[in-house]
Amino acid sequence: MIREFFRSASGVAGFAIILLFSIIAIYVVATFPLDYGTRYWSNPKYWEEYPKLVPPVWYNYFVPEKLPQHYISELRAPTATEDNVKRWVFSYNFDADKFPTGVILKYANLTFYESLPIISIKVKRPDGLEVVLMDFDSGIPSPRPGESPPYVRFVENPRSIVLSVEPGVVRRAAEFARSQGVNCTVTEVREAVLLPYIVFGVPQGSRCSAESFKPLKGTYIFEVELVGDPRDRVDYVRLIVQGAVYGMMGTDYLGRDLAQGLLFGFPVALFIGGVVAVLATAIGMGLGILSGYVGGKVDEAIQRFADVMNNLPLLPLLILFVFVLGRSLFNIIFVLVVFGWAGTTIIVRSMVLSIKTSQFVEAAKLAGASSWWIMWKHILPPVLPYSFALMILNIPGAILSEASLSFLGLGDPSIPTWGQIMQQAFDNGALQNFSWWWILPPGILIVITAVGFVLVFFALEPIVNPRLRRQ
Amino acid sequence: MASLAKTLAIKAVTLFLVLLGVLVLLAVLMGATGLSDRLLMSILNEQVRAYQQQLIQQRLPLEQVKKAVEEYNKTLAEQLGINQPWYFRMPQMIWRLLTLDLGESRTLQSSWGSRKISDLILDRLPNTIILTTTGIVFTALVGIWTGIYIGSKIGSRADRVVSVLSAISYALPLWFMGLVLVFVLAYAPRILWGIQIFPPGGMVSTPPPSEPLAYFLDLLWHLALPLLASFIVFFGSWAYTTRNIVFNVSQEDFVNFARAKGLPEGLVRRRYILRPSLPPILTNFVLSLAFSISGYIITERVFNWPGMGSLYYAAITALDEPVIFALTYVFTLVYVVARFILEILYVIVDPRIRLA
């Protein structure tokens, strides 16, 4: 039977897809924390450093103009210490044809003894110009009355300065732009997020817009200075130049690494599909055997009920139920099972009707076997193979239903699923922004998963369906 | 003939019970979870607050206001039925629906501003019918024709292609296909080359063309992508199902017998294979038409199509309970009616049922 299965091309292809996806799912379960959804995925703070809405890294191979990579550098010890001045020096090599999307400075565990330390940042450009972006950090809380040195700041949450929105920095950048002949007001720089263009570009015109700047390639030296008491220190200083490409799958509007979200979708999809299919098939098979074997009123009742369940406008009811019961994984699985068992029952019953008249059942009856025994020992085994095939077919059905619900915004908000990624993409203008890396991959994964199971079913059906076999 | 009438009557009763069952299920779902009470309460509170504001602005004495508000609260609660528990309130609602009194929506309005649910449906139903019926009729005709053709050529290359297409049919949701088409054929050309090949959604351009012919062409232009998506997704399953039905019939003894009698192949196909294949094909066709009224919720959303599906989704997100109820009822009603029409059609097309 197994050899027969693997002789069909669709069986091999389907099996390969399912095997690959299962391996990925197991890898994800082993390496990701189970509360990944709530702890990281739905936590915008975690994705702060990531560039927002940028295509994957490999996009650069297909476009003539190179987009800058994401750059993160962290220094623990100061590069140079003179007296009461500590200096951290970052060197960023900019060789792309487009601009980075932002610059972020981070530090943590600031410890100071006397007055507030002065933390500044300046950049030396390849053309020799030097820009002071920030004279001092105004976001450090002063010592509270009664607090004694050493004063420690930014322990739990590191200090994070997003340069393109920090008022002092924006003012400095606008001044620099004006000194270069571009008429920019502070508001314009802040609202159009022009800081990366001003810092990494040479002006071509005097209009204050992104188009007025051309990238200036070369090595940029960022110097972060801390001036204060000689004992003042920070644990680390981190400089992030947000690229315009990121990772294997790009990022979404919150800067989330889509590769992670898509990976987490593997076990979730297989889990939902598997659990729903197993439960729905088990219920459907049990009722089908009961209905077919016992017959009479029981049969009539079960078949009528199954007929009703099988013939309802499914999608509106699924939507309504999940909406009323609440958007949780458990409710979604529950509703899919409740509306998913009827088809199996009807098919299994018709199989049982023909098995019931066979001689081994008659013999068992004559030997005095109880109905339960016969159903368990003589009816169930011949029904199992085909039920298994039906179960395989139910898996993609459940996965697609979950994706549909998620796409309508009815997915479990604590778990990232492919359908939800698509929904967020659709609702946040991925079509209008042409963010193909955001909206297409989750859908393609959904379809590939479903195709895998359907192919396996197609290969299984002629083997396990006695009727097709005879032909 | 008497037995035939009896069978039809039994079918009618069963289908009516389905209808009733769905309504009861809905009533229990909305009632037992407390959703219905919560909704009515919020409406009640809102209206009472508005009334109170109005009285206070008239500068009536505080005592009098308090009394009037209490009175109003009581009459309104009675009007809304919130003074009764849900299992008393719901049967009335079910009865009204069964007598086709759909009532009024809470917030949603039709395009001409009416809050009557029958107007809402009249507003949207034609749009859905334009969208789904054209797609299904077109796809089904091509698919059935292909299936009949392939049914006599089992194992050919065309047959293998169709079985692969049917697998895709099952695994590819219509809404995703629609999304891909909108993305690739509507947005991509506009963003990359600045030309609008297909519209990114909607049913007609804004503002719609005033000339009838121009309007019709504009509608066709907007229909193109949904039709294409529906064809790609459903063609395989139509062809494959039809092929199976035709193949199964052509294995029957009476077909062999007809051939053995020396009847011409054309006649065998028409009379001995296609005629008995008709009822199940017809079933597929009528049921998919009936389901399409409710089954395009997500697709309508993707194409921004102002149909029944969009209305249902809007009703759910706006928590418009009467509309949710009425629409679910209408969806089931359409389906049940379609099932009954089928039963009658069987009698017409299948002499085996008529004469049994």
Image (cartoon, grey):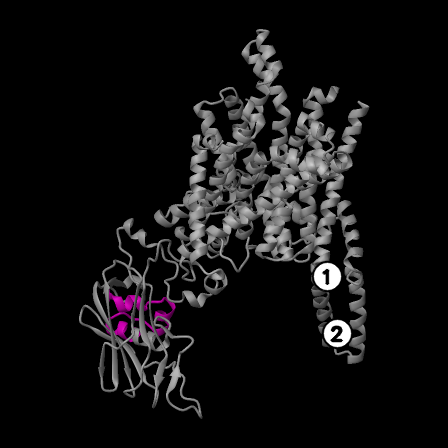
Which residue: 58% across, 47% down? A276
What is the secondary structure assignment of the residue under circle 2?
Answer: helix
Toward the bottom, the furthest residue is A146
Amino acid at dot 2? Leu
Which residue in the protein does label 1 denote? B37
Q: Which residue is mark 2?
A: B55
Please name the residue shown 80% across and 73% down the image.
Answer: B68
Where disc 1 sits, the SS reads helix
Name the residue nearer the viewer: A118 or A36: A36
Membership of A235 in magenta stretch? no
Q: Hey, which quadrant is residue A469 in on the image?
A: top right
Q: Position of residue B41 (x, y in %)?
A: 72, 64
- Location of the C terminus of chain A (image quadrant): top right
Q: Nearer the viewer, residue A413 or A63?
A: A413
Q: Crowdedness of circle 2 by 10 Å Cα count: few (<14), some, many (20+)?
A: some
Host chain of mark 2: B
Marks 1 & 2 on one chain = yes
Chain of the residue displaying label 1: B
The residue under label 1 is which amino acid type?
Asp
Look at the image and tell me whether residue B305 can be seen: no
Residue A392: name its quadrant: top right
